[in-house]
C-alpha cells in the first residue's frame, strides 16, 4: 500500500502519521520527492482502514500495490535511486563503467589491468576472487588472497572494487570491499541475500540465467527488506534456444526494469555473449537502451586467462569501446 501526502505537509504531522502507521504493525518507507511525499507501507496492510487514512487532511490518495515486490517498486519510490560508491554515482542520470578481469590471477595482472581500464575511463574495478565454476576441476579463484590483491590494485589506482561473494560464511572477508556482487547462480540464495541486506554495502545483483524480471526484483526485495536499499540490478543474459552465444542479452530488460523499479540497471555484455567481438555492439546497444552502466571483462592476455578469456577484451579494445560509449551518451543527452 502507498499513501501519497499532499504537498507541503508539515513535518510533525507527517511524523505523527508515520508513528501511527508503525503502531499498526507495518513498516513505513518514506520517499520525499520534489513535489510530493510517498509513504510505502510494507507488511500486513489488511488491518488498515484505507478509507480512514484517505480521509486525513494531509493525505492526497491511498492505493494498494498488487505486485509482490514493494521496496524496489517505482510506485513506492517514483524518483530514481542513485547508489553512491565513494565518489562514483550510479543511476538517476549517472553512468558507471565497471571493468576488469574475470578472475584475479596475480598482483602484476590485476594492477596492469586496473591501470589500463582507469586510463580508459573506468569508474570501478571488477575482479573475481571467489569463482563459481560449472566444473569442480576449473580454477576456483585465489579466494582471500585474491581479495588482498584487489585492495592493492585499489590503492594503486583509486578505483573502488567490485567482487563476488558466494557464501554468508565469507562475509567477514568482504568488510573492506566496496561493492558486493551476487552472481547469477546465487540470485536466489535467499540466506545470502538476507545477510548482505543487513550490511550497509552497495550490492550488484545479477539476474539468474533462467530467471524472470519479477524473480530478479523479488531477490532485490530480500536485500531491501532486510534494510539495505543500495541495490544495483544487472542484466547479464539469459538461456534461450540460441546456440551461437553463451547466453542471450535481454536488452528489453533495461527499459522494463526502469519502468517497474527505481533501482539502477547495468548490463554485462561479456557474460551475455561469451564472445569478445560481440561485447562492443551489445555494450553500445545496452547504452542506447538506457542502461545506467556497464560491467565488462578486460584482460591483458586473454588467450592465457585462467577464466573466460574468450569473452575478455584487451585493454586497447576496451579503451576504444569506452570512447564509443561516451559518444552514445553524448548523443542521448
Image (cartoon, rainbow, N blue to C red):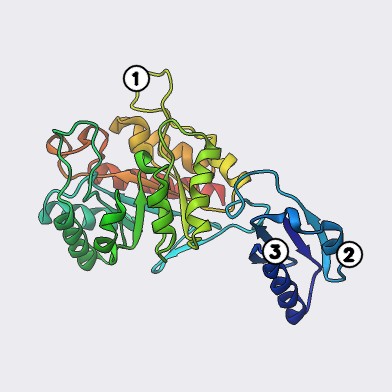
Residue 226 in the image, given as x and y percentages of width and height:
49, 59
Depicted 172 relative to depicted 280: above or below = below
Whether the residues at callouts 1 and 3 have beta carbons within 8 Å, the answer is: no
Residue nearest the observer in this picture, 186 or 5: 186
Residue nearest the observer in this picture, 184 or 296: 184
Picture quarter with the N terminus: bottom right
Whether the residues at callouts 2 and 3 have beta carbons within 8 Å, the answer is: no
- Drawn side of residue 253 relative to residue 142, left or right: right
- Drawn side of residue 28 relative to residue 246, left or right: right
Disc with the residue nearer the chain's start (2 vs 3)? 3
Residue 170 in the image, given as x and y percentages of width and height:
26, 56
Residue at mark 3: 39
Residue 220's disc is none
Disc with the residue nearer the chain's start (2 vs 1)? 2
Secondary element at tag 3: strand
Q: Residues within 10 Å of mark 2 (few under 14, many from 20)?
A: few
Secondary element at tag 2: loop
Residue 162 in the image, given as x and y percentages of width and height:
32, 55
Disc with the residue nearer the chain's start (1 vs 3)? 3
Residue depicted at 24% across the width and 49% down the height: 128
Depicted 127 relative to depicted 197: above or below = above
Residue 55's disc is 2
- Drawn side of residue 215 relative to residue 37, left or right: left
Quadrant of residue 107 within the rendered picture: bottom left
The CA distance from mark 2 to mark 3 is 16 Å
Residue 209 in the image, given as x and y percentages of width and height:
40, 33
Residue depicted at 39% across the width and 57% down the height: 195
Amino acid at each position: 500500500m502507498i499513501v501519497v501526502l499532499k504537498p507541503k505537509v508539515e513535518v510533525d504531522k507527517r511524523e505523527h502519521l508515520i508513528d501511527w502507521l508503525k503502531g499498526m504493525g507495518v513498516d513505513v518507507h518514506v520517499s520525499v520527492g520534489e513535489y510530493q511525499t510517498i509513504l510505502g507501507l510494507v507488511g500486513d496492510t489488511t488491518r488498515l482502514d484505507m478509507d480512514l487514512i484517505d480521509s486525513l487532511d494531509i493525505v492526497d490518495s491511498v492505493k494498494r500495490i498488487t505486485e509482490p515486490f514493494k521496496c524496489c517498486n517505482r510506485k513506492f519510490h517514483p524518483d530514481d535511486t542513485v547508489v553512491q560508491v565513494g565518489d562514483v554515482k550510479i543511476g538517476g542520470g549517472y553512468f558507471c563503467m565497471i571493468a576488469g578481469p574475470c578472475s584475479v590471477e596475480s598482483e602484476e595482472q590485476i594492477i596492469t589491468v586496473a591501470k589500463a581500464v582507469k586510463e580508459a575511463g573506468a569508474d570501478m574495478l571488477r575482479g573475481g576472487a571467489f569463482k563459481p565454476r560449472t566444473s569442480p576441476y576449473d580454477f576456483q579463484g585465489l579466494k582471500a588472497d585474491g581479495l588482498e590483491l584487489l585492495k592493492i590494485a585499489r590503492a594503486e589506482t583509486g578505483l573502488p572494487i567490485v567482487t563476488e561473494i558466494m557464501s554468508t560464511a565469507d562475509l567477514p572477508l568482504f568488510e573492506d570491499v566496496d561493492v558486493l556482487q551476487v552472481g547469477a547462480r546465487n540470485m536466489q540464495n535467499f540466506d545470502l541475500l538476507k545477510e548482505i541486506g543487513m550490511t550497509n554495502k552497495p550490492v550488484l545483483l545479477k539476474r539468474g540465467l533462467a530467471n524472470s524480471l519479477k524473480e530478479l526484483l523479488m531477490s532485490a526485495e530480500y536485500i531491501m527488506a532486510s534494510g539495505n536499499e543500495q541495490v544495483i540490478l544487472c542484466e547479464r543474459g539469459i538461456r534461450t534456444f540460441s546456440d551461437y552465444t553463451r547466453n542471450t542479452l535481454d536488452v528489453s530488460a533495461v527499459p522494463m526494469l526502469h519502468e517497474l523499479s527505481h533501482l539502477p540497471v547495468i548490463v554485462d555484455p561479456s557474460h551475455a555473449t561469451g564472445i569478445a567481438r560481440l561485447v562492443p555492439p551489445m555494450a553500445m546497444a545496452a547504452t542506447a537502451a538506457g542502461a545506467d552502466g556497464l560491467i565488462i571483462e578486460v584482460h591483458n592476455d586473454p588467450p592465457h586467462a585462467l577464466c573466460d578469456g574468450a569473452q575478455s577484451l584487451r585493454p586497447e579494445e576496451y579503451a576504444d569501446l569506452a570512447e564509443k560509449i561516451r559518444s552514445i551518451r553524448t548523443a542521448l543527452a
